[in-house]
Image: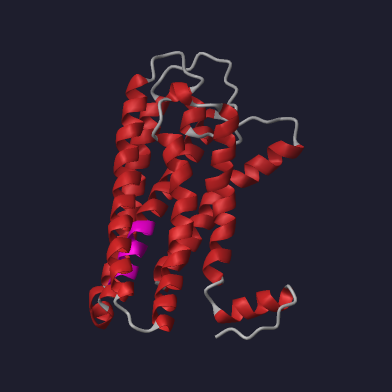
Amino acid sequence: MYFFLSTLSVLDLSYATTTVPQMLVHLVNKNKTICYVGCVVQMYIFLTLGITETCIFAAMAYDRYVAICYPLYYGVQMSQTLCVLLAVSSALCGLICALVYTVFAMNLPYCGPNEINHFFCEIPAVLKLTCADTSLNDQVNFILGFILLLIPLSLILASYIHIFVSILRIRSTQGQMKAFSTCASHVTVVTMFCIPCMIMYMRPGSEAFPENDQKLALFYNVISAFLNPIIYSLRNKDVKRAFLKLIGMSEDIR
């Protein structure tokens, strides 16, 4: 679990670093420009990290499934080799699929004005600038969105159905609460990240609204990355105790 959490932390840090520094510079600087190559690179890195994170979420769900449903076999099934293999496979999936997204988007003609109504180079905002038909891009985005979002979410859902059934078989109330708390943080993080991404990338470009897109992108790019460490840290008893002390509650945590 901590191997995947550390991987997720690196992804969140890199994810936000790809876009937030430039956004902050643009907030205080009158010159709000980015070169063509810089836009392409930013788009590709952002997509690579986002797709990799989605795959890592699915791997984490499988990890929780094995830990709760087959605890005696956990050390054997979730070996270090398998964990590294899942992480590397997620990264390769991100690299390849992000390349497809980027190539299809940047092969279109852009006639100007080249003003992106967004705080970074994201595909839906960039496609608004093209003077060609984007129906093929919409189809590619939907197919990749189905593969990269709905399939991992289906695997996560199937894992948690099995987990929920296993939890109900636990006779101890304390054991049930421990199992639920283990899964609650992961479900929360997945929901915050994947639902906005589905809305953004699986709808036709004609239905995109720049103002709403900016809010969605800000949510899964900045807010989600900011909240992830807090959500996972609240599972730690020491962190809970410090938090309760901070807000003036001195109750013991058991």
Total tally of numbered discs in the picture: 0
Quarter in which the C terminus is drawn? bottom right
Residue at the image point whose x is 32% and y is 73% from the top: 168
Q: Label the magenta part by its dominant secondary structure.
A: helix
Coloring basis for residues: secondary structure
Bounds of the magenta segment: 56-66
Residue at the image point whose x is 35% and y is 45% from the top: 149
Q: Nearer the viewer, residue 9 or 159?
A: 159
Q: Nearer the viewer, residue 213 or 110?
A: 213
Q: Position of residue 234 (x, y in %)?
A: 56, 71
Q: Is residue 102 magenta?
A: no
Q: Position of residue 160 (x, y in %)?
A: 33, 62
Residue at the image point whose x is 44% and y is 76% from the top: 177
Q: Quadrant of residue 148?
A: top left
Q: Nearer the viewer, residue 25 or 230?
A: 230
Q: Nearer the viewer, residue 131 or 188?
A: 188
- Residue 124 in the image: above or below residue 153: above
- Residue 40 in the image: above or below residue 162: above
Q: Position of residue 250 (x, y in %)?
A: 70, 83
Q: Is residue 45 visible?
A: no
Q: Quadrant of residue 107?
A: top left
Quarter in which the N terminus is drawn? bottom left
Residue 229 lies left or right of residue 152; in this view the side is right
Q: Quadrant of residue 198?
A: top left
Q: Is residue 162 visible?
A: yes
- Residue 215 in the image: above or below residue 35: below
Q: Position of residue 14 (x, y in %)?
A: 52, 54
